[in-house]
Image (tube, helix red, strand yellow):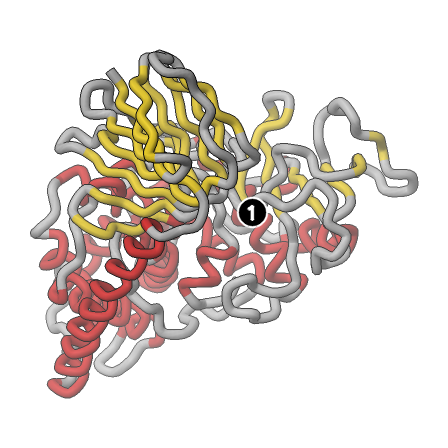
């Protein structure tokens, strides 16, 4: 896996269930076409052989990746490896023990994530050769290690069912400020310098990271702090196992801090991984403490080790000033970007649907955490879609942008869905609406419908 944040995003397409570690996979992910022979992927049998090679090494106490099945899609066929049984449509591959296949993409195999087929948990992957964000080549070993990463998520889900970060808190995460950007950027960089053992040493930089983290989290409520700790444990440890499997460099390149809410989840990967790497040096056997429940979070073990150590590292005055300047400039650019995004959504060609749900608020059933962005307090842009539901209906949006507004309780009270290619058909006085396209399935009742020609349809849930 590449070190940049965008590569994290491109290879971690997991829909977020509000109360689940792994959401129901419902098409919100960037789904591959059911038949896409032009997809540039590694040879599936080479990937399978490499996974089997990597998973033979001890990676984590109690984790046996060879016991966890996985699935691949290569643009033409879906392969299941070491699956217990014969799911409908699959047949054994001649001369390939333990491998099943079927023509086309199985609906559950949507990318690098964890899924269930016939109630069996498995890792899944589409092992592309190049990052769709950065264009960087992805080696065979890296692709195989990502599958080990997803197998570790299956292990976590089964063995540690209480490791459930609530991605729903991202929906109400406060907007970043220049100060929060500055603190997050320096915290992550301090951890990286600790791993690289920059002078004056790894423990000194680790203490600096801890101090910066405590300052940044002082402005967050307890639920948001708990989420950060949980997602760093969940994703950071999975990436730690992935890097160990692939034999990759522990430190990598500087990590861009990005913007909340998406950046909170993105930064959990390197922060959690680097914390684990430091623990390997400072506290041998710490993994057993996590597995046995003697410690809940890796960062707690690290903080306990550091509390008796004196001395912190410091960024130079020039480095601190540059970081602050970058944060202020980034905020200015972000504000301009937010205005441009709102303008483009309102000016998209085709029709749009505006839903007023103040009387009958909707709630998120699932969403894609890497594709959301806050454009104003309680107002989010979703680039990949979501599932919203109340007691009377639902909205399923797949792969298209939309805007949601929430109240103080996290309920959705307004939705804008632009760029519809097909008009909404309804009769005067109609009280229910069903609308279905390739990207949108909307079933709402009771609803009051008003139109502004064929350009905008205003729906009021009442």
Tell me if residue 51 can be seen: yes
Tell me if residue 164 can be seen: no
Give how far across and how far down residue 243 sits, in percent. 50, 60
- Find disc 1 in the rendering and name its residue: 112
Vertical arrangement, residue 18 with respect to residue 11, above or below: above
Foreground pick, 102 / 244: 102
Could you tell whether 359 is left or right of 283 in the image? Answer: left
Give how far across and how far down residue 191 sits, in percent. 28, 67
Q: Residue at x 19, y 64 (%)?
A: 181
Vertical arrangement, residue 403 with respect to residue 191, above or below: above
Q: Residue at x 48, y 62 (%)?
A: 7
Tag 1's secondary structure? loop
Where residue 90 sits, quadrant-wise, is: top right
Where residue 143 sits, quadrant-wise, is: bottom right
Could you tell whether 35 is left or right of 134 in the image? Answer: right
Q: Residue furthest front?
A: 453
Give how far across and how far down residue 291 sits, in percent. 39, 38
Query: Which quarter shows the C terminus?
Result: top left
Tell me if mark 1 has few (under 14), some (14-19) or many (20+) residues whose alpha carbon lies within 10 angstroms of its own. Answer: many
Foreground pick, 393 / 311: 393
Q: Residue at x 12, y 73 (%)?
A: 311
Give how far across and how far down residue 430 sits, in percent. 37, 13
């Amino acid at each position: 896996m590449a070190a940049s944040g965008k590569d994290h995003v491109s290879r971690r397409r997991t829909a977020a269930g509000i109360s689940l570690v792994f959401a129901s996979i419902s098409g919100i992910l960037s789904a591959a076409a059911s038949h896409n022979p032009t997809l540039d992927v590694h040879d599936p049998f080479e990937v399978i052989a490499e996974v089997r090679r990597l998973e033979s090494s001890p990676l984590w106490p109690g984790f046996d990746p060879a016991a966890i099945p996985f699935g691949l899609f290569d643009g033409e066929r879906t392969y299941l490896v070491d699956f217990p049984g014969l799911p409908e449509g699959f047949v054994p591959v001649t001369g390939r023990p333990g491998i099943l296949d079927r023509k086309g993409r199985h609906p559950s195999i949507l990318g690098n994530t964890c899924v269930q087929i016939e109630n069996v948990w498995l890792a899944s992957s589409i092992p592309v050769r190049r990052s769709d964000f950065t264009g960087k080549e992805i080696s065979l070993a890296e692709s195989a290690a990502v599958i080990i990463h997803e197998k570790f998520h299956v292990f976590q889900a089964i063995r540690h069912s209480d490791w459930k970060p609530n991605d729903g808190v991202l929906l109400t995460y406060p907007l970043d400020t220049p100060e929060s950007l500055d603190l997050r950027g320096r915290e992550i960089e301090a951890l990286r310098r600790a791993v690289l053992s920059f002078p004056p040493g790894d423990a000194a930089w680790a203490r600096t990271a801890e101090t910066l983290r405590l300052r940044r989290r002082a402005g967050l409520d307890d639920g948001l702090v708990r989420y950060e700790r949980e997602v760093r444990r969940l994703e950071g440890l999975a990436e730690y196992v992935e890097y160990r499997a692939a034999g990759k460099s522990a430190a990598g390149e500087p990590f861009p801090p990005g913007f909340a809410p998406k950046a909170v989840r993105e930064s959990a990967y390197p922060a959690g991984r680097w914390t684990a790497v430091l623990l390997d040096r400072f506290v041998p056997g710490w993994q057993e403490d996590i597995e046995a429940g003697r410690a809940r979070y890796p960062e707690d073990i690290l903080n306990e080790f550091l509390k008796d150590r004196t001395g912190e590292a410091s960024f130079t005055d020039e480095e601190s000033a540059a970081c602050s300047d970058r944060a202020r400039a980034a905020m200015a650019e972000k504000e301009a970007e937010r205005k441009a995004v709102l303008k483009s959504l309102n000016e998209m060609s085709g029709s749009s649907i505006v839903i007023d749900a103040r009387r009958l608020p909707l709630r998120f059933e699932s969403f894609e955490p890497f594709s959301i962005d806050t454009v104003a307090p309680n107002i989010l842009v979703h680039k990949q879609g979501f599932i919203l539901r109340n007691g009377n209906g639902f909205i399923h949006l797949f792969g298209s942008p939309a805007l949601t507004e929430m109240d103080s309780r996290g309920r959705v009270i307004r939705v804008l869905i632009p760029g519809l290619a097909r008009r909404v058909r309804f009769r005067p006085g109609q009280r229910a609406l069903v609308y279905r396209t390739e990207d949108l399935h909307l079933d709402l009742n009771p609803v009051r419908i008003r139109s502004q020609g064929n350009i905008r349809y205003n729906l009021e849930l009442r």
